[in-house]
Amino acid sequence: MKTYILITGASQGLGKALALECATRKMNLILIALPHSGLGTLSNFIEDNFNVEVHFMELDLSATKSCYEIFNYVSDNKLQIQYLVNNAGVLSRGMFNDLSDDFVLKQIEVNVTTPTLLTKLLLDNLKGNRPASILNISSMAGFFALPKKQVYGATKAYLTSFSKSLNKELKNDGVSVTTICPGGLNTTTRLCYQNRIMGWVTRKSVLNPEEAAKIAIDSMLCRKKVIVPGFVNKCLMALDWILPEAIKDWLTIREINKFPKPI
Amino acid sequence: MIVLLTGSTGYIGHQLALALAQKHIKVHALVRDRNSLNIPLHKNIRLFQGDICDYQSVLKAIIGCSHVIHTAAYTNLKCKRIDHFYNINVRGTENVLQASLKYQIKKFIFTSTLSVYGPSYKAVPIVETQPRITSYSNDYELTKSMAEELVKKYRKKGLSSIILNVSKVYGPGLSTFSNGVNRLVSMICKKDLLIVPNKLKIVSNYVFIKDVVNAHLLALESNSKNANYIIGGENVSYMTLFKTIKQLTNSKVRFLKVNYSILRNAFFIINSIRYLIGLSPIITPSVLDALFVNRPSLSDKAIAELNYRPTSLGLGLMKTTKHLNKLS
């Protein structure tokens, strides 16, 4: 039976890399991203060159009704979902006080509400295609307290916690839940630039999306629980256990202050 | 029509300035050094002392212009400092864009590079709709992509523009970092033995300098706006390129193929030693990596929409070798 992997936020960054990685592995794709984000061009390119089937939907995932639209599209076309990748996310943008109310609500909507609701809506479909998997793209920021990443870090802590509990719940249904918590990724040009001017440890810890995507899909297929990709990131997690709070605070503030002012 | 031209002491800009001037188009050339030997001289070219990194100097040069061609860029891949690339390619471009918007420039032509599309997917030639598959492999690619994003951002503010994604340029002209093929021709002429990496099946696209200049003129005059065009020539492997140049120059050079990783490491060691004794690096591993990835491309869109007509590689290389022979 023909099955699909559904990936949200697939037009750029890690989502795009995940779509290309899955296409290389001959998985059929359902790609979701914002309108005017180049999703159609990407989908056509994949369909033309990778010999897989691609469906795509251009939707704004900060609106709850988008999740129901995805569910309806999947049901109407009788698409069998074997894998769900909740990748779409809104990154952090500055100090809490400077963020607009709208931005914060949108961030919570996309990072928390959407993956939760989408998982709920597609769960029966996934159960019908066991062994099935859910891959949730969280972040290392979910483990740490970071200035300028207050809401973002908290939404990712939610996603990690949600995934871990769900994984236990779904053990007998043949659906595994994998959470991947990347550190810095070279996704947008702006982030690539930021990552390149950081200190040595940060630069070494940054992964390219294509590397992270490969690790993520491998981990999902091996039904792992929580993954921090990259050797340096794993070391940082270990250091986190050892180092006293004061030193960690000093280090994070030093790195964060290197961020260039937006132009 | 009066055109503000940046980068007129560069490989492409120099010839473009003269080509515009010969077409009776007045050129405002923004130059850092009025005494540079690379300044294009013509009665239709007016020099403006300045720098794209200095917004006020751009404002002075743009007054009276209806069009802008922005060819200036920092291209030296050997440079390890990203701030050079960022200041010139990103901030510099933003200055020129801002001035263009302020003075209601009718069309902004941006000289970019094919490398913003990254490598091709397997052997599928790169076209304008190819998404980038891998991350930015060097600071030049990254900052040129950032500059393209800025050009697109200014489209939304009302500045019409065309981006030309130029492949590897060769042909008669100034000797700068941007014409490696010319250096290759000279090397094949002079040397008896050339050490080359064993990745000779890698395919790249080569475009003749006159075609690049012509593409800019076509972009300036066409009705097309707010589009990207790949400006390339023929797709050939290094093997074919080397053989063609060898034949054209009647060279007796022999090619010694060396394992790519060994060569890459050798360059790393040589450069480290040169660094210790205060010399600038020869080819760096990152330059080598940028050169040895597949980048075939198609210029069908430019051919159809701009009436672009590329020169064949054989003819282009013949003209190049003649020119280089004259020089030596």
Image (tube, coloured by chain):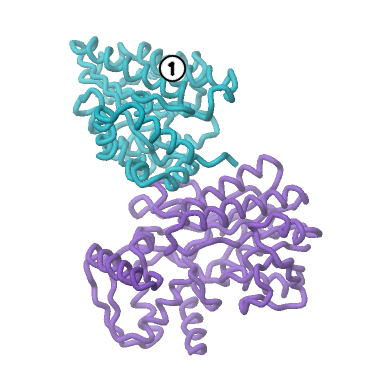
Chain colours: A cyan, B purple
Q: Determine the image quadrant of residue A19.
A: top left
Give the camera-side residue of A135 and B294: A135
Q: Which quadrant is the N terminus of chain B positioned in?
A: bottom right
Determine whether A61 is above or below B142 in the image: above
**Is residue A57 placed above or below B146 in the rendered structure?**
above
Instruction: Give percent across and percent down for residue B110.
Output: 61, 56
Q: Residue furthest right?
A: B64
Q: Between A259 and B9, which is closer to the camera in this rendering? A: A259
Residue at x 23% of width, y 30% of height = A219
Left or right, B59 with reference to A105: right
- The image shows residue A207 at horizontal and vertical percentages of 34, 41
Residue at 49% x, 46% y is: B129
Residue A6 visible in the snapshot: no
Q: Which sits in the foreground, A241 or B34?
A: A241
Residue A40 lies left or right of residue A6; in this view the side is: right
Residue at the image point whose x is 44% and y is 62% from the top: B79
* Image: B121 above or below B295: above
Let me know if residue B68 appears in the view.
yes
Residue B142: x and y, percent? 47, 51
Q: How many marks?
A: 1
**On the image, numbered disc 1 is attached to which residue?**
A114
Foreground pick, B96 / B313: B96
Position of A204 with respect to A188 (left or right) is left
Label 1: how many Cα within 10 Å (few below 14, some 14–19, many 20+): many
- Secondary structure category for the residue under label 1: helix
Chain ID of residue with mark 1: A
Question: Which residue lies at the image location 41% right of the left edge and 23% below the top edge?
Answer: A153
Residue A140 position within the rendered picture, expressed as x and y whole percent measured from the top left: 34, 29
Q: Mark 1 is on which residue type? A: Thr
Question: In which image quadrant can residue B64 be found?
Answer: bottom right
Q: Is residue B66 left or right of residue A7?
A: right
